[in-house]
Image (tube, coloured by chain):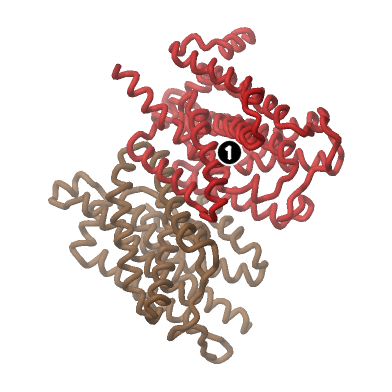
Amino acid sequence: MQIRTLKDALSFGDLPASERIGFILFIIFCLIFPWIIKGGFAQAVMVQFLVFCLYGLGWNLIGGYGGQVALGQAKNVGMSAYTVALLMVRWDISFWASTPLGVIEATIESFILGYFLFRLRGHYFAIATIAVSLVWQQLFINWNFVGGARGIELPLREPPNFIYMRFDSDIYYHYFAFLLVMLAILYMNWFRKSKLGYQLRAITSNEDVAESLGINAHWVKVKAYCITGVFAGMGGAFYTVYYGYIDPFSVMHLELSIMIALMTMIGGAGSMWGPIIGAMILIPLDRYLGAWLGGRGIIGVDFMIYAMMVMIISAYEPRGIWGIIEKARRKR
Amino acid sequence: MEMLLSTTISALQMGLLFALVALGLAIIFGVMNIVNFAHGEFLMIGMYTAFLTATVLSVEPLLTLPIAAMVGFLLGIASYYMLIRYLLKGPMIAQLLGTFGLMIFLRYLAMCIFGPDYKTLEHGWLIGKSIKWGPVLLSYPRLGTAVLSLMAFGIIYWLMDYTRFGKALKATALDVEAASYMGIDTENMRGLAWGLGGATVGIAGALLMNFYYVFPTIGMLFCMIAFATVALGGFGSIKGAFLAGLIMGLIIDLGGTYVGPQYKLALVYLTFFLVVAIRPKGLFGW
């Protein structure tokens, strides 16, 4: 059984050759990137791209395969980031011991929330997740133990420090994030062939029919939401050590949740590579355009561009860029 | 006791405004089962319209109401014909994220044009004036807002229940196909529902401008309050929106006074959760 799982995760044999080649090119690109492009800004953008890939792959589970518009991803990221930061600052616990705790925390939080919120369907669910994340943000802004609105700063340590994950170069972070993304991709590769994956897709296409086939829709959705929490938790833990500073406006912000959802939607929700394509387009666009426009004192144009993209995509091709690619492929 | 009385009165005045904001959302949801995430941004645009006409053309703020209503109406119509029409064909996730995209677009458009500063109106017939009535201090802008909201509600109620247009709209809401067999142009009805929703929220924005400041991200706040209001009243119910708006006003103002101003919004969300958990269809929902 375990060997079967591993084989499922590692085998990309059922994908068309073009996708496999694309995937290999992606791996090669990520592996050699820090050695060919030395610019500090470009490397930082690349790390952010990988982190957002992680978030997006996680969100794709519930939002894409599950069809549930959960806009509270930021609070899972924030829960884990805060847990890790607090453990590292107040009790000097190493990154490797605090990260599992942070991830567990985010997962438990997802479980409890999912258990209650998945009694709601559709619009109600989406609004409820927004409300929850706004409440959490308010709570963390007013809660002094976690630093309130000022946030938490990790103490400086002598780099390179593998126990507390403190490095002076982005290369280390790059490979660590890449490792996490690869694990996430392998997991997703297993997931789409797993029982849970089929059950979730059945629920997306028609919940009532799925239930009549004996699928416990509520339980499946809660499980998927918990897995999403794990992904977000890992991302949050990484975020903490990468920036060395968190506050309720960076990790708990609704804008982060929105960004994750928009990105996945543009790339193609419910497809294997959608989140990665979305992140590949949106993150460099966001950072370079943001920096370029910010330097000229123009704010907001970048967000307007994503909003346009999302509106066009949701109106004409709800399956995103991946949907367009698949359509073109079928025509040929 | 006096404090309770004056808080309650100001809460009810505010509640009428919340009800008016929620009304547009309720109409749109009632007619085509789509949640407009950009509703708060419509309000923001109504406020900026009032602000701009009042300052640039130096028009009395109260007289900007028709202009704000017109802008809101056109905005609603335009969003229906340019976006929502296509979204309705897609899956629910596309509908949700599509209106979400509209919200972000409008918000950052405002950010781009007006900058992130807070803006208020300083001159007007009502602004800054108040009257002492027994132990209660009544502020003119809030009183005027309450009266005009009530009037707007009356008009919408009349429109919905006593005109052919209202009946056609209701028929479209109940069953699109049957309505189109009866010779109702359902496509236009849906567009008009968006226009009506936009117009009411535009009026609410122009009224709000009399005593509140405007900034590009104000939409989220009022949007969440409107969602909670509509959930409490029942999606699609006008009576429900009215009553729930008053209740919401009481919760926010009384909660803000007696629990603490920083917990105002938490109370709104708490109400929302309790409603969707206990009675998901709201007070008057169907």
Expressed as whole percent of the image width and height from the top left, the position of residue A152 reads: 76, 48
| Amino acid at pointer 1 | Gly
Residue B90 falls in image quadrant: top left
Q: Residue at x 46, y 66 (%)?
A: B18
Q: Chain of mark 1?
A: A
Label 1 sits on residue: A114
Q: Colour of chain A?
A: red
Q: Is residue B92 left or right of residue B259?
A: left
Chain letter for the part of the structure drawn in brown: B
Q: Secondary structure at mark 1?
A: helix
Expressed as whole percent of the image width and height from the top left, the position of residue A33 reads: 62, 24
Q: Is residue B88 left or right of residue B280?
A: left
- Whether A80 is drawn above or below B247: the answer is above
- Whether B211 is drawn above or below A22: the answer is below
- Whether A209 is drawn above or below A131: the answer is above
Q: Quadrant of the C terminus of chain A?
A: top left
Expressed as whole percent of the image width and height from the top left, the position of residue A172 reads: 73, 27
Expressed as whole percent of the image width and height from the top left, the position of residue B39 reads: 42, 57
